[in-house]
Image: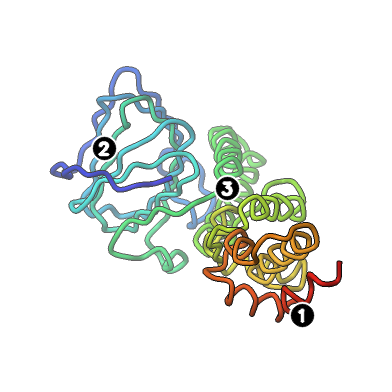
Amino acid sequence: MSKILNMQSPNIVDVIEPTARCKERFTSWGTARTDDNIAEAGIDELHPGYILGRTRPRFHLLLYTLKGQGQVYTPNQVRLVEKGDLLVVPARVTFGYIPHENPWKLMWVHLPDNRFWAKVKGSEIKVNPTILTDYMERAVEGYFSEAHRDGETAQEAAKLYSDLISVYVERELSHERLLDEEPIYEQLDRLWDTVRKDLGYPWTVEALAKEMGMSAPHLYRVVKSKINMSPMQKVTQLRMDYAQEWLMLYDQPIRNLAEQVGYVNEFAFATAFKRFSGDSPGKFRKRR
């Protein structure tokens, strides 16, 4: 997960200084005349000693870490990025990056600073969570393969890969995450299992969304469409299911239960329990 490092940013100038061990693959300008949505893409393996700096670049940058970690810096801060992070650098924003201690394998995409990608415009870099790394890597590798071939069919195939990359980028920028290749119900089941194991945690929609690797609004839409309740309504249901079972089995003070299921005191729990079940905890316990 990206974090800001407590260190001073170096002076940033336009520079690329590779080392002998670095490996860089990219589409050169004009290699594949596909469309105006993707300007250039590359997959690099960078070793300590590599330096890249850009002052007011003409293109937007999207950068995915495939292996290792990198330090990304602006005039104001230094960030550590790793797999699972998507770095977005708008055009005209000064930045630089270097590997962090060990080799850093990364994938990058340049987007033209045009009206199609107007949503990327901004004055600072952003680091967002992503689970699209593997999808993007396959698409970029396919783009490489076809863009460097001769023939009309190769150009057609390169265009298809370019379009696919554009779709993935749009999903990233609109916070619509592709879920894993497994069914969404299985992912939600794992999420609810995580909640069951720690019902006392102060769960929020944002915390749940982080577990799923998507934005809070997108998680809300997914859960609502699949189980017809909000994420927090589901958390409440899980807490109350546990509470009902506990009340049937144990004679301990109800305040002990309140703490276990995430309520600050017995009164708050009792209010939520009655709203959920129609009975107070004490009355429910008498059903035994």
| Residue 31 in the figure: left or right of residue 183 | left
Q: Which residue is mark 2?
A: 52
Q: Which residue is mark 1?
A: 279
The outermost residue toward the top is 20
Q: Amino acid at mark 2?
A: Leu
Q: Secondary structure at mark 2?
A: strand
**In the image, residue 203 lies at what x, y percent?**
56, 62
Residue 95 coordinates in the image, percent (x, y): 25, 48
From the image, tell me which residue sits under label 3: 132
Q: Is residue 118 left or right of residue 8?
A: right
Residues at circles 3 and 1 in contact by the CB criterion of under 8 Å: no
Q: Position of residue 229 (x, y in %)?
A: 72, 73
Q: Amino acid at mark 3?
A: Leu
Give how far across and how far down residue 168 sits, in percent.
57, 53
**Which type of secondary structure does the marked residue at label 3 adopt?**
loop
Instruction: Identify which residue is drawn at 77% across, 82% down.
Output: 278
Image quarter of the C terminus: bottom right
The CA span between labels 1 and 2 is 65 Å
Q: Amino acid at mark 1?
A: Asp
Residue density around tag 2, few if under 14, some if 14–19, many if 20 or more, within 10 Å: some
Q: Nearer the viewer, residue 90 or 270?
A: 270
Q: Residue visible at 22% across and 50% down?
A: 77
